[in-house]
Amino acid sequence: MVVRSGPFRPVIDRPDPGQGHHKLPINLKIQNSVWDLPLWSGMENVGRGTRVQGQDRIIERHLLGLGVLVLTAITGYTLSCLSDGREALPSEHAALRAESARAENASADTGTEPEIGIDAHIREVAARYGVSADLVAAVIEAESEFNPRAVSRRGARGLMQLMPATAATLGVDDPFDPRANIEAGVRHLRALMDRFGNNLPLVLAAYNAGEVAVIKHRGVPPYRETRAYVKRIMRKLNRDTSAVRL
């Protein structure tokens, strides 16, 4: 029968209960008795050089083996714990800095420019064209959720989701450039505001569905997506949405 007792103890072969302890070899009997000793009392006895009549060499050898086994395990565990909380080496600091730089580059590639920079540009461009900065921010949130790399199923791109034809008309070479995209989007909003007499629901509907659709339907087109879009931005700006029918 195989017995394992304790996390640091080796496997010991013991006979089945019916065989009786009188048949055990003398070394196995001593092994069992050693494992039953209190751990620290056993090591203390080793330190005093205790001798046991009859099997003193065997017991001493087993006690020494136990001490080495336990000390080795404790040392390994301690070193493992220390390695988790030790101070990083200079080379590791350099590796962390390199990883941080890679993360920043990846952020630039995936279009996660800090919103603080985008907000400042929104305020600057909105003031230049006489458009509410809150309106511009609400349109960007509805269009792309501030993701400069966003692409719609219809091909609209960037923060303010410029269609390729619109981007070309406004002279935008790279619609994924946040600054160029915002500049063009605000210019487009300004043109729509001038065309529809600053009627915000019509301006938003034209931005979403196109000027032709608004003119054709003489108001907000009966498109579920467009009406939900207009209502969402109007609510964001705390404006009355009663004129926008579902």
Image: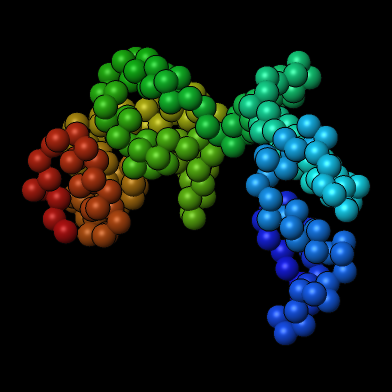
Q: Is residue 246 above or below residue 241?
A: below
- State the residue at coordinates (77%, 82%): 19
Which residue is at 75% across, 79% downward? 20
Q: Residue at coordinates 68% horizontally, 44% vertically from top-left?
A: 39
Q: Residue at x 88, y 53 (%)?
A: 54
- In the displayed structure, 164 sits above or below 82; it is below
Q: Position of residue 175 (x, y in %)?
A: 54, 34
Residue with the most extreme bottom position: 18
Please state if 102 lies on the left or on the right of 188 as rendered: right
| Quadrant position of the C terminus in the picture | bottom left
> In the rendered image of this protein, does residue 206 appear above or below residue 99?
below
Residue 65 visible here? no
**Residue sitting farthest toward the front:** 53
Residue 240 % position (x, y): 10, 41
**94 or 49: nearer the viewer:** 49
Quadrant the N terminus occupies: bottom right
Q: Quadrant of residue 85?
A: top right
Q: Report the side of 122 relative to 96 (left or right).
A: left
Measured as percent of width and height from the top left, residue 26 is found at: 87, 64
Q: Nearer the viewer, residue 60 or 130?
A: 60
Where does the image place residue 124, in percent across and percent down from the top left? 37, 15
